[in-house]
Amino acid sequence: MPQLIRSFVVIELPDTLRYQIKGYIHSLESLVKSVRWVNTNNLHLTLKFIGERTPEITERALLSLTQATAISPSFQITVNGFGGFPNLRRPKVLWLSSVAQPEPALNQLRETIEIILSEIGIEKDSRPFRPHLTLARIKFKEDLSQLRAFVETHPFPPVTFSVNTFVLMRSILQKRGAEYRVLQKYSLRNPK
């Protein structure tokens, strides 16, 4: 049986934003104990988790995703707003939200990717799309009142960046965490 390839489609972040998020995480780390913080080098905005597929399906995804480059224009994203899934009272995941400018652009890109990949047999995601950057995963229940108070008085300052590309990324699971490798980078068209 061929080795399966675990992959997903993402928007990469500019280094300046990664650096700002790293500083923000540093100010939060002492406020909670049972949290596994994401390596800021791995931060990204996931558009579609493809999962583990055969090399043939991954190759078809690589080729099929080029269709999105002709359809989808570049746009901007603003990162701001701290939250948690399912909520900030009892979160399992801590995140920063992301909003596209113009607003429908990010959702349209994601929907285009969903349609393209469904045509090669990769099922559409049944959950609603909630664009976010995962900062941490919470291992155990803990009092997060200090964290919530800090976030309310020290919100992450909004940062806007241009999205000109998206990436098909491979995830290789390691004991120290996932290692990500770019399989293909796709350029979005310039808006008219």
Image (cartoon, helix red, strand yellow):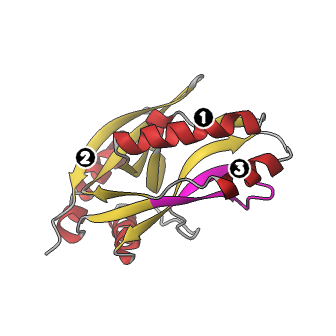
Quarter where residue 175 is shown: top right
Q: Give the percent coordinates (x, y) of residue 35.
A: 72, 37
Upstream in the sequence, badge 1 or badge 2? Answer: 1
For disc 2, the neighbor class at 10 Å (few under 14, some 14 to 19, many from 20) is some
Mark 3 — residue? 150
Residue numbers of the magenta segment: 79-97
Q: CA distance from mark 3 to mark 2?
A: 37 Å
Q: Residue at x 65, y 50 (%)?
A: 94
**Residue 44 circle label:** none
Local SS, label 2 = strand
Q: CA distance from mark 1 to mark 2?
A: 30 Å
Left/right placement of residue 128 relative to residue 56 reads right
Q: Per the image, is 87 magenta?
A: yes
Mark 2 — residue? 185
For disc 1, the neighbor class at 10 Å (few under 14, some 14 to 19, many from 20) is few
The relative height of residue 105 versus residue 45 in the rendered view (above or below) is below
Task: Say which quadrant the C terminus sits in.
Answer: bottom left
Residue type at tag 1: His
Residue type at tag 2: Lys
Upstream in the sequence, badge 1 or badge 3? Answer: 1
Local SS, label 1 = helix
Label 3 vs label 2, nearer the camera: 3
The relative height of residue 127 versus residue 53 in the rendered view (above or below) is below
- Say which of 54 and 190 sits in front: 190
Q: CA distance from mark 1 to mark 3?
A: 12 Å
Q: Residue at x 71, y 50 (%)?
A: 150
Mark 1 — residue? 26
Quarter where residue 76 is shown: bottom left
Q: Per the image, is 135 magenta?
A: no
Q: Give the percent coordinates (x, y) of residue 155.
A: 60, 55
Q: Is residue 140 visible?
A: yes
